[in-house]
Image: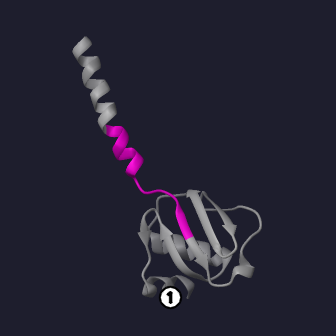
């Protein structure tokens, strides 16, 4: 029984750093700072908070970054930068997001 508990403890210890390194959250820069909301906005489960033109979010559904960008741009306005769960969009992807 003691060896089983040791193995479980070892597995948990090894899994913790992997979970901590998983990319989460998001960041964007609005093309027009005047369109930034003054209160948090929830889009697809992500809570977006803006300071000036820069907005950050935590949480949210598991979806591809280009789709998340389109959903956010539809509510907050055009973006000039967008990163979702560790994936930064290219200039071409941002243009498509804003279209």
Residue at the extreme left = 3
**Circle 1 residue:** 95
Q: Give the magenta range.
A: 15-27
38, above or below 60, in the image: below
Disc tally is 1
**Which quarter of the image is occupied by the C terminus?**
bottom right
Above or below: residue 71 compared with residue 34: above
Query: What residue appears at the point 55 percent right and 57 percent down from the top-left corner?
Result: 60
| Towards the viewer: 31 or 77 | 31
Task: Name the image quarter holding residue 64.
Answer: bottom left
Q: Residue 49 sits in which quadrant?
A: bottom right
Figure check: 41 above or below 10: below
As for residue 84 lying within the magenta part, the answer is no
Q: Is 12 on the left or on the right of 58, as rendered?
A: left
Q: In terms of image quadrants, where is residue 92?
A: bottom left
Residue in the foreground of this view, choosing between 51 and 46: 51
């Amino acid at each position: 029984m003691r060896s089983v508990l040791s193995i479980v403890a070892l597995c948990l210890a090894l899994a913790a750093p992997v979970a901590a390194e998983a990319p989460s959250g998001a960041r964007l820069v609005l093309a027009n700072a005047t369109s930034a909301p003054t209160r948090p906005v929830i889009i697809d489960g992500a809570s977006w908070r803006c300071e000036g033109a820069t907005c950050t979010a935590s949480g949210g559904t598991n979806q591809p970054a280009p789709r998340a960008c389109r959903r956010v741009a539809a509510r907050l306005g055009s973006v000039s930068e967008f990163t979702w769960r560790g994936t930064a969009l290219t200039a071409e992807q941002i243009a498509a997001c804003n279209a």
